[in-house]
Amino acid sequence: MSSEGKTGASRSEPPPGQRFSLAYAEAGKPLQDSPRARARIAAYIEDTLYPRTSNIIPIIRRELGTGYLQYASDIGKLLRDSQLRDFLDAISLIGEGLITGTYKYPSEREHWFKFVERVFREQNVGYQLDAMGGVRFFVDEEFEHNRSSVLAGLGTAKRETAREAFEDAHRALATVPVDTLSAVRRAFDATENVFKAMTGEARLGKSEIDRVLKRKLGEIYEPRALDAAKLIADGLSAWTNAAHQYRHETGQPEPEPPPIDIAVSLVSAAGGQLRWLVEIEGRLAKAAGKSA
């Protein structure tokens, strides 16, 4: 198409040869399940991995407790029709089957996992594979980048407890069904741990933020930055109050788990709070002539 015929000039052009649906379809919210993703993944077994059924079938039957399986088409039917948890487990088990037994096929395992990842992204399914082929919850690239950068910032020994709590929050989002209540609680635990270590306070709450954190901000920021930092601290207070909605109070019934969008928002925001608190701690230590 000539440049005169193009519309939306600000939009980047799709790669040459990319299918129309991938170039122009709006992704929307990631899906928990997708019949088309299942069908494509099942087709890969039937069309490509059918010679490896003797490797794959025993481990699927043993670990999922399925009925009789004999052909690649049986595995394909399982992938199309099974419960979501069995479908996601089978993806990992198929990869494991390709590198166990008398004959091993590591390159075919790699190609299998790459294909599954591509299907997940192209069909906008909210999962990804970890380094060993385990299926994990996936929101979007920004969410994953946020998680990785926060974990890197919590990499020191003194922040091990906070790191474990933040990892737990993301593991809770990777379960099927998603454990949103644990995700929010562990994200709060991680943030509170860093806050308590920095301030010496016994808890993370609005009064502690106003009384202690804002005073410490005055030690490291000039007036204009201090005004901005105090507003960010107010945001931390609001986030803390929101997370407290899902804390369990003694003598009170367990709260209803938050919807997935609320849980993802709170966990994602926890990442920003953690990065900022770690930065503040470093600035305070530098101002005091110490190493963080």
Image: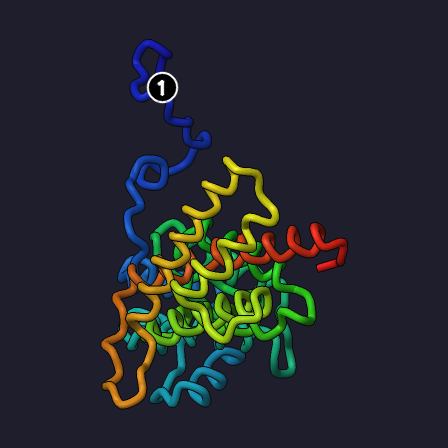
Q: Is residue 266 above or below residue 219?
A: below
Task: Name the residue at 62% across, 69% down.
Answer: 159
Measured as percent of width and height from the top left, residue 265 is found at 35, 57
Report the side of 56 relative to 39 (left or right).
Answer: right
Measured as percent of width and height from the top left, residue 93 is found at 49, 77
Q: Amino acid at mark 1?
A: Ala
Q: Is residue 58 above or below residue 31?
A: below
Report the side of 208 relative to 107 (left or right).
Answer: left
Depth check: give the residue in front, 261 or 193: 193
Q: Quadrant of the C terminus?
A: bottom right
Depth check: give the residue in front, 258 or 34: 258
Depth check: give the residue in front, 32 or 101: 32
Identify the image quadrant of residue 34: bottom left
Q: How is the image coloured?
A: rainbow
Mark 1 neighbour class, 10 Å CA radius: few under 14, some 14 to 19, many 20 or more: few
Task: Name the residue at 27% across, 74% down.
Answer: 257
Say whether residue 84 is visible: yes
Farthest residue in the top direction? 4
Q: Is residue 179 above or below residue 64?
A: above
Task: Name the residue at 65% across, 64% down.
Answer: 155
Considering the numbered disc 1 on the image, is that residue within a helix, a strand or a loop? loop
Report the side of 193 relative to 30 (left or right).
Answer: right
Q: Quadrant of the N terminus?
A: top left
Measured as percent of width and height from the top left, residue 25 is found at 29, 40
Depth check: give the residue in front, 75 or 138: 138
Say whether residue 51 is visible: no
Residue denoted by label 1: 9
Q: Is residue 133 above or below residue 28?
A: below
Identify the image quadrant of residue 100: bottom right
Task: Name the residue at 48% across, 56% down.
Answer: 273
